[in-house]
């Protein structure tokens, strides 16, 4: 029984690591998705500025806004549907 | 001699019993780990589908010359093919199933401002207000396409009146500016993003029921919901 108990510690650790790694992959996917969406939104807003400087400001502002909307600070998951 | 043999048999039996007991807990542990792993995999797939839907919508909405009509089943196959394994297809051609295990919602929502009022209101002129342009200052649908099992799920942002939505998913300027049923609750929209007057956002949402991957009914995976705004 002692051997099984020792093995169980390792098994639980490995299973935990596997689940954790899976979660990291999902977070990576969502982060990637948020960056993509921010880039697309920034691209749309570039033509809002009359000058290069204004266009850059608009693009940066929009990219930040959409990145934050797609990856809420409180959680990596979007808000659940009401 | 016989005492030793008897003890050996007894120890062997005890070890088997212990192994059997441990096996029960290990079976549940591995089943749970498998279910969680598969669930994470599906979550990643749903995330990718939503991202692709947003990219296609950007192409469809902002570049009319692309002639990419996402209300057309042939084009919806692009997304359903990416959702392979989620049970969203009705046939081998990857046509979306209206009774399947998932749904995709594509919406364009605008905060109605002077530009929308000027092009949607025929009898009135600036300065615009809710009096001469009923949806002024409200969030309204400009585009809406629903794919898949839309009887089971609905967009978080609501559904525009069916009569307002054209066959290609677009909504006329008149309905955007004047149809008060074609609005999104401000609280719902601002909980996700706050737009400036006249600014629009493209939103892709995906629901997927992945309960089919559960090994045991006690490990019931949730319905996955993911959305992308761009």
Image (cartoon, grey):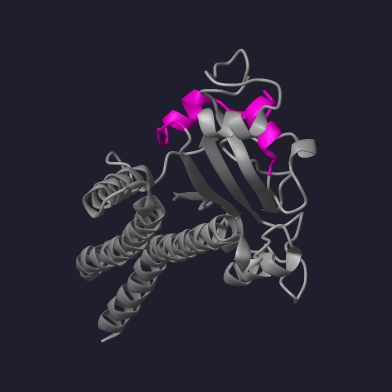
- Total labels: the figure holds 0
Above/below status of A28 relative to B141: below
Where residue B22 sits, quadrant-wise, is bottom left
Residue at the farthest right position:
B163
Magenta span of residues: B171-197
Q: Is residue B179 magenta?
A: yes
Name the residue nearer the viewer: B218 or B139: B139
The location of residue B28, given as percent across then percent down, is: 44, 60
Percent position of residue B214, x then y = 55, 59
Which quadrant does the N terminus of chain B fall into? bottom left
Residue A1: percent from left, percent from top: 25, 66
**Who is closer to the viewer here, B95 or B197?**
B197
Q: Is residue B116 above or below residue B108?
A: above
User: Is B49 located above or below residue B171 in the figure?
Assistant: below
Residue at the location (26% across, 65% down)? A17
In the rendered image, residue B190, in percent from the top left (x then y), is placed at 43, 29
Q: Residue furthest top?
A: B131
Decide if residue B123 is in sight here: yes
With B148 as the anchor, is B24 left or right in this view?
left
Residue at left offset 61%, top offset 65%: B65
The answer to whether residue B38 is left or right of residue B69 is: left
């Amino acid at each position: 029984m002692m051997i099984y108990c020792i093995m169980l510690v390792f098994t639980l650790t490995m299973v935990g690591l596997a689940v954790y790694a899976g979660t990291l992959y999902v977070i990576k996917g969502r982060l990637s998705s948020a960056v993509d969406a921010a880039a697309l939104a920034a691209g749309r807003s570039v033509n809002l500025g009359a000058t290069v400087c204004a266009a850059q400001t608009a693009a940066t502002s929009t990219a930040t806004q959409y990145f934050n909307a797609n990856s809420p600070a409180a959680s990596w998951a979007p808000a659940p549907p009401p | 001699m016989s005492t030793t043999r008897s003890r050996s048999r007894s120890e062997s039996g005890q070890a088997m019993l212990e192994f059997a007991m441990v096996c029960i807990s290990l079976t549940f542990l591995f089943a749970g780990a498998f279910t969680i792993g598969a669930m994470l995999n599906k979550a990643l797939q749903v995330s990718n589908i939503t991202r692709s839907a947003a990219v296609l919508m950007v192409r469809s909405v902002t570049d009319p010359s692309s002639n990419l009509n996402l209300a057309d089943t042939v084009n919806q196959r692009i997304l359903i093919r990416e959702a392979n394994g989620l049970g969203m297809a009705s046939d081998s051609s990857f046509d979306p199933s209206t009774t399947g295990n998932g749904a995709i919602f594509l919406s364009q929502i605008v905060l109605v401002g002077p530009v929308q009022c000027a092009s949607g209101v025929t009898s009135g002129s600036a300065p615009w207000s809710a009096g001469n342009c009923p949806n002024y200052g409200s969030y309204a649908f400009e585009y809406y396409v629903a794919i898949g099992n839309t009887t089971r799920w609905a967009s978080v942002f609501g559904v525009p009146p069916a009569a307002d939505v054209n066959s290609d998913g677009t909504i006329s300027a008149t309905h955007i500016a004047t149809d008060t049923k074609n609005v999104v609750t401000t609280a719902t929209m601002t909980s996700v993003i706050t737009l400036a007057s006249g600014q629009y956002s493209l939103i892709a949402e995906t629901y997927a029921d992945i309960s089919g991957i559960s090994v045991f009914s006690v490990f019931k995976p949730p319905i996955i919901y993911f959305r992308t705004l761009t």
